[in-house]
Image (cartoon, grey):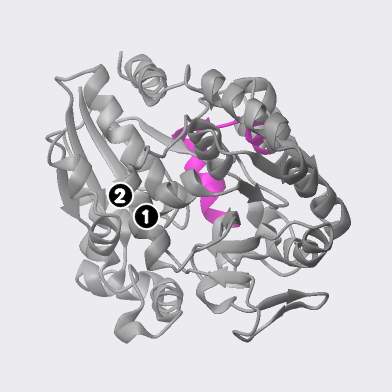
Amino acid sequence: MKIAIIDHFLNPGGGARIIRSLLPALRTVQPDLDITFFGTEHGIKREQLDEVMIPNQIKAKALKSTILSGKDLFKIKGSRFVISLLQAKLGKSVSFLPYYLSGKVHKELESLVKGFDIAFFPWPFHLECPKLDCPMVGIFQDFNYKYYFSSNVSTPWMTRSLNTQIPDLLAHFTPVVTSQFVADELRKFYPQYGKDIKVVPIAPMGEKSDAGAVKKTLDKFCIKKKFLLYPTNTASHKNIGPLLGALPLIKKQGHDVCLILAGLGTENINGKACEQGVELNSIEQDVFGLGYVSNAEINALIQSATIVVNCSLYEGNNGPALDAWAQGTPVAMSHIPPFVELLNTFNVNAAIFDPRCPKDIANKISSLLGDEEGTRKNALSSKKNIARFTWEDCAKNYLNIFSQLIT
């Protein structure tokens, strides 16, 4: 089977970690696969994907159409989105230009992806549907652009674009989702495409770090005490605010912990948690925003955290929790349908809180901190139970879907 895996965006964080986990698993399950990965050159370098591609004999081709929009130019934050907007606004009027100027990913794919048995898109968003000569499969992670949280998840032009592109993609793709919750969301928003949905849960994406790697990471970020870890970004649905409000309440209950945020944009959140949010100074600092960290570093942080927290209001899955359970790290998370679904799917434990209530967040986290023996016992039980679910299982499910489409 000849597979084209296409990720023109290579989403920092969970999206990239899915790629790192799935590619080797596909090779392990079926060693004779012919796999080519098409993606953004910047993303491939940022995520050090050569570490998994070269050993697994997976070919990588950088998309020229993502050169300008694949990263912020001259380190000017947000410049990539300005370029994407310009390319989208100009539309067909720039189609005659070279791909790196026009940004027409779908047109470049039509010229490159030929002679493949299947085209697989792990993140088919912000993409015009290409016309390929093989079946197309995509993971539709969630539909957060259909909601307003405390601010818009994307800019108005991005939302308009998604509302046009996603129905067209669904009309030509076999949709895969990672939870029953997202399957229900897809049917709600796009009922005409609800009958062909495939649900394939993901497995934990992290790897165990040795003691040296953990120490190196903790020393690099000057972490010297127990900490809560929220791997996240600053999008509104990630809901960081109530967790910041909960931290002083947790400390008032006698727990000397700090909060570490890791992910895009979090490097600006450093200071002392207070009722208003975070007082941005280094005096008595208890909130540390690390920004985007490497794959190895997030593995080490998850493994050494006292508790991994996820306060999100809306997700398709919960990568931080999956990775925490796999490492035997306790989890505290929002009481939202996709998170609760995981408890039943994997038979794991977590403290569940109202994500909009700092007091409830504080009480649930404090209950874990105050019962060390019970918390440790539940974490070890979760680790044992989730170990039965592997990326090889996921790869088999995907390969089964591919085989059905090409026969």
Query: In screen coordinates, is 353 left or right of 53?
Result: right
Task: Point out residue 333 in the picture as x, y percentages from the top left corner.
Answer: 70, 44
Residue beneath the point at 23% across and 70% down: 100
Q: Residues within 10 Å of mark 1 (few under 14, many from 20)?
A: some
Regarding residue 360, the answer to whether it shows in the image is: yes
Residue position marked by numbered label 1 in the rendering = 215
Residue 175 part of the magenta segment: yes
> Magenta part mainly helix, strand or loop?
helix
**Which image quadrant is residue 242 in?**
bottom right
Residue position marked by numbered label 2 in the rendering = 212
**Which image quadrant is residue 32 in?**
top left
Kind of residue sitting beneath label 1: Lys
Residue at mark 1 to residue at mark 2: CA–CA distance: 5 Å
Residues marked 1 and 2 touching at CB (< 8 Å)? yes
- The stretch in magenta equals 163-187
Secondary element at tag 1? helix
**Which image quadrant is residue 234 in?**
bottom right
Regarding residue 336, the answer to whether it shows in the image is: no
The circle on residue 184 is none
